[in-house]
Each structure stands twice: as C-alpha cells, then as structure tokens.
Image (tube, coloured by chain):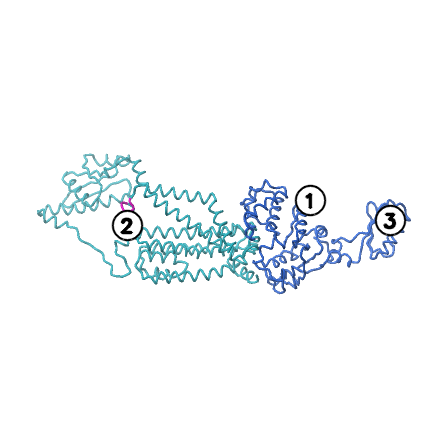
Amino acid sequence: MHSFWIIFKQSFLTKAKTKSFIITTLIVVAAFFLLANLSNIIEVFQGSDEDGNVLHVVDESGELTPILQARLDQLGSDVQAMPTDLAEAELRESISEGTVEAYLVLEQEGSLKARYVSESANELGSGNEVEQAVQSLQTAVAAESLGLSESEVGQLFAPVAFEREALSESSKSQEELSQARGLVYILILLIYIAVIYYPNMIAMEVANEKSSRVMEILISSVSPVKHMFAKIAGIGTLGILQMLIFGLSGYLAMKTAGTELTEGAFSVFGFSNVKISTFLFAVLFFLLGYFLYAVLAALLGSLVSRTEDVQQLMLPMMMLIVVASLIAFSGISVPEASFVTVTSFIPFFAPLVMFLRVGMLDIPLWEPLLSIGIMLVTIGLLGWFGARVYRGGVLMYGSSQSLKDIKKAIRLGNQK
Amino acid sequence: MTLSIQHATKKFGDFTAVDDLSLTVDQGQMHGFLGANGAGKTTSFRMILGLLNPNTGVITWKGKPITYAASPEIGYLPEERGLYPKMKVLDQLVYLAQLRKMPASKAKQEALVWLERFQVPHYAAKKVEELSKGNQQKIQLIASLLHNPSLLILDEPFSGLDPVNVEMLKSAILDFQKQGATIVFSSHRMDHVEELCDNMTIMDQGKVVLGGSIREVKRSFGKQNVRIKMDEDLTSLKDTAGVVQFTKTHDGALFQITDEETADRLLNESMKLGKLRHFAIEEPSLEEIFISKVGKAYA
C-alpha cells in the first residue's frame, strides 16, 4: 500500500505542478469570470441603449403606424415603429450606409400589403416580430372596417390559454424540462470533457514512462498493476480537484458579478429548480466514466513505445466517447426516446446517457442503479483485463501501433 | 548460496532467448555475464527480477522465488537507461528509492553523499535531460543502489563511459560489494569481467558456452602464454616441443604452450640466444578462450 501512495502522490503532484495544468486552469477560471460579467461588460461598451430597434415605416395613410406600434408592444417586442417621410430610395441608401437598420412599407389597397427591407436576410429576429405585428394589424384594421365595438375587438384578440400536460409518469412537466435542460446540458458537457481529457493524460503519461524507459525501473520496483491503478487514482484526484476549482470559481464568478442565478439569462440553466440529486449523479457518473475510460487509456498507453503513437491507438476509444456524446446531446430534446433508454445501459455510453435520463426524467431509482452496477462490473472486468495487458505491454518495445498488440501483450504478461 | 538459477529456459514463441541457464551466486560475490547483443543477458536479468517468468526452471533468491515483496532488497540498472527526463535529479533519486521502500529523508541524505562521491553534487537540482550521457549514467547507477540493496543487478553499467568515469564507477561497485552485496553484472568488455569477477557466464545465442570460476576456466583451458622480450630473433624457438602457436611481436615473441615444462624449455633456449630482458608466463585472456570455444571472435 505504501508504494501505491508514493506513485499516487507523484503522478498527482508532478501533473498539478506543470505549467500547462496551472495555465489551463487559470484560463478557464478567467473565462468564467469574464462570462459571468459579460452583460456588465457589454453595458460599459454600449452605454445604456434603451431605445431598442428603430423601424422606419413608410405609411402614406399615417394611421397604421400607431396601431402597429400597439401590436408590437403587445408582442413584447422592443421595436420602435417610426413614421418617416423619406422616399424609399433614400432609405435604401441609409441602410447600406448603416444609419438605418430596416424599414417597412405599408400600403393599403383593399387588403394590407407590407414589405420589410433590411440589410441582410439574417435579421430574422425583428423581421418575425414585425410580421406577426403586421398580421394582427391586418386583423385590427379589418375589425375596425367591420365596425366592431371595443369589447368585440377585445374578444377577438383574447390570447388562448394553451397549456401542455404530459401523461407519461417519468416525464417532467414542460416547465420543469426546460429548466433542467440547461443544467443537464452543462453537466453532460463537463463529463464529456473530463472523460476525454483525463484518460488522455494517463495514456500520455504511461507512454512517456515507456519511451523514456523509466518504466522498466518502475515495474521492477512495484507491480505493474499497482502502478497502473495508483496512476489512475492520482490523475483522477487531479481531475476532481480541477473540477472543484471550476465549479467553485464559476459559482463565485456569478456571485461577484451580482447576477442572480435564477434571473435573466441564467434562468435558462435552471438553477432555480435544481435537485441536489442531479449534482450527486453528475459527480458519480463523472467518476464512473473516468475510471472506465482511464483503465482503457492506460491499457492502450501501455502498448505503444513512442508518445507519437498514442493518438493513433486512442482513436477507437475517442470514437466511443464521441458516439456517447452524440447520443446524449441529441437525446437531450427527446430523453424518452428508445435509443436513449437502451444506450443508457451500455457501459461506455452510460456515463453520459444515463446521466441525461436521470437529469431530465423522473425514472425509477433502480434504472440508474442498474446502469451503475453494469458500469462497475465493466470497470472491474476491464481493470482485470487491462492489468493483464499492461503487465506485458510495458515490457514490449518496437513498432507497436495496432490493437493486435493486445494479444501479444497478454501472452507476454501471462508468461510473467 | 543466495541467488540460484536452475535450468531456466525462456522462449518467446518459437524463439528461445535463454536455453537451460543454471548458475549460483554466493553472498557477496560478483558474477559477470558476457555475451554479444542478443545473447540472452537482458532476458536472464529480467527473469531474475521476476519481470519475466521462465517457461521452465526455477530462480530463487535466499531460497525463495523473487516477488515484489523482495523489492527493497534488489537494485537494478537496466541496459536501456531510464529516468524521467523532466524530473530533477534529487527528486528522481528520492522517488525511485521510495518505491523500494526507503524513507524519503534518508534517501535524500544518501543521494547527496553519492552525488558528492561521483563529483556531480551541483546537478542535484537539475533536470535529467540537461545532463550529459555519462552523467546520466552516474545518476542511473545511484538510482540502482541508493536504497542499499543486497542483490544488485547491473546491465552493461560501463557502456558509453570514458575511462575516468569507468574507473570511478568500478571502484564504487567494488566498495558496494565489500559491504556484502551480491552483484550480477553484464558487459561486452571481457577485461571488465576479468578484473572484477570471481565467477562468470559467457552466453551465445541463449546458451551458456562457458561458465564458472574464472580461475578454473583459465586453468582448465590448458593453455598458457609465454611472453619473451629480447633483441635477438626468436623465430628459431618456434618449433620447440609443446609450443602450439608462435606470434612475433615488435620487441620479442609470444608463445602459446600446453604445459609448464615447455615454459622451462623456452627459458633455457632463449637464454642461450642472448640477453633476456623479459620472461613471463601469462594466463590466457578470456577473449582467447572465448574465441577458441565459440569459434568466432567476440563482438
């Protein structure tokens, strides 16, 4: 046990003290503070621009613009409709000069005709709002020409009470879902990055020790299996530490920025309605995913003799992670789809996909537990298998760049 | 008897790396392994260390198979030198000694003593990759014996060193032996083995071609050399009874003979020829023995 801690400490400390690790951590922390203060920073640069977008309206009758403005306000738009006397040619010029963002031509010839002109078709945002407003403007004008009373018009425009209700028991209400989605998205992203970043680190470390030939000294001192697991534990602890730093600085950044986590843009992330269990599952699936892929990475790292060959051998593993992330990210909008349910029990996809289900749905507890059980068994099997490969792999030198070498390594390890 | 190898054979697929190796090394002895590249020396060492298990045969150290429990007692200098290039010398030595269960504080203290002895104390805080090859080798040797092992295995400890450093390392290894350590080392330089070892094993393509006490090997070789130095021409002595081989040298001649009577005869005959400056009976060198046994020059 004694030497386990020495290797553990060494792989943890040397990595934690490297410049690249410190710099990466600092950059991410800085990015957090920057993002949290982004709205403050934008305000500084823009000044208080409360006017919103100004829409120039060519309206010959002069009666339509106020009604349009009323409709826009009702839609919650910040577009300001402003009647203009300028001719279209002048307006077009102003758009190309950049002084005018967009203009609208309203003509009434029996029915209402509208033309929206902006610099590029990309500005769909306000264009959509304007279209909706013009639509209801048309209705209002028609209602007026029919001579409806105020209350009749009111009835005509009364919004529909539209509510969604999901009958499936596991499904959360629409409101809950959209709140959970943002947070789950972020956490899946974190787990995804972690299972790529840290196992890669392990594979590089192992390959480094092999290429610098220090491995032979190490495994003549301590058993390769102990060496492998101490290394995995050391880097894993480093990962947890880094994630903690990120989490804490993210929290502090938003606190100091004076942003309420439950308000404004952050309401998308759903921090207002977070269950502690979501975080606990995130940590759990992070650890399981890490160990699963770390053992695999150590195994692959032990097969190469030069660090240059690591990436090539890691490719199949990377594909697994990418597929897992694709399932998870596409499943975030359809968490109840059967492909999500099935893959959440497949060990290499489970860390991401089962977490998605746990975060998005109210599934019975046995499901994540079963998935965790399957992962634990897989980690155990992979650990046993990995140790066998590792034992032989670390003694193998030569141009080993293919997975066929696993067989060779096991044979060498068996004879050991 | 502390280290014992009995009929160890190691095969990799169809290739036999070590074929029926048997030897014993007593406590405090130095045992030399000789052989060209690919002769099976490194595989033998890896078997002793337990990194590889023999297909057949038994290897024991103090009566027990070598496992990781014996790790603190064993020191190893691999042929392919291996240190962390980016780690500082002292940190590295302490780390490697700790893996062999030496307390960090003691390891640090002893490491500084060894660095001093090898005249490189100023490298303690330098990264290994900044050191010259010869100096890296000194660090590697310190790493192998810092934890005070009782069995020291050195694979080619002197290769790539200049003569001054070879002497420095040799004397350190001899001192270490005097403290009671059992040492097994390999070399491709026969003179190093002749100088340092009591016993040796010469391997060729996995097989032991010659082994045992060096004195014994030389005696049983049954041939000796007589070196004579004088100004007169010695060619006339070429056909003296008992002379196997005659080689003219720049200041006299070298005779290979089979028995000591021939030496007496050569002495008498040469004194008749003129003034004798030098007469010596020399043991055959291992190199000569190797060539005559294996039938080819030593690599």
Q: What chain is colored blue?
A: B
Q: What chain is colored cyan?
A: A
Q: CA distance from mark 1 to mark 3?
A: 36 Å
| Residues flagged by tags 2 and 1 on a common chain | no
From the image, state whether disc 2 or disc 3 is nearer to you: 2
As drawn, B65 above or below B225: below
Looking at the image, residue A182 sits to the left or right of residue A381; the answer is left
Return the chain for callout 3: B
Return the chain for callout 2: A
User: Does the magenta run of residues contain A86?
Assistant: no
Q: Bounds of the magenta span?
A: A260-264
Q: Amino acid at mark 3?
A: Leu
Q: Can you say which quadrant of the picture contains the N terminus of chain B?
A: bottom right
Q: Quadrant of residue B212?
A: bottom right
Q: CA distance from mark 2 to mark 1?
A: 76 Å
Which residue is the site of mark 3?
B234
Callout 2: few (<14), some (14-19), or many (20+) C-alpha neighbours within 10 Å?
some
Image coordinates for residue B205, horizontal then vertical, percent: 67, 59
Which residue is the site of mark 2?
A272
* Label whose residue precedes the other's in the sequence (1 or 3): 1
Circles 1, 3 touching at the beta carbon (< 8 Å): no
Q: Secondary structure at mark 2?
A: helix
Residue B83 versus residue A82: which sits nearer the camera? Answer: B83
Residue B89 versus residue A85: which sits nearer the camera? Answer: B89
| Residues flagged by tags 2 and 3 on a common chain | no
Image coordinates for residue A253, horizontal then vertical, percent: 34, 43
Number of marks = 3
User: Does the magenta run of residues contain A262?
Assistant: yes
Circles 2, 1 touching at the beta carbon (< 8 Å): no
Q: Amino acid at mark 2?
A: Ser
Circle number at residue B163: 1
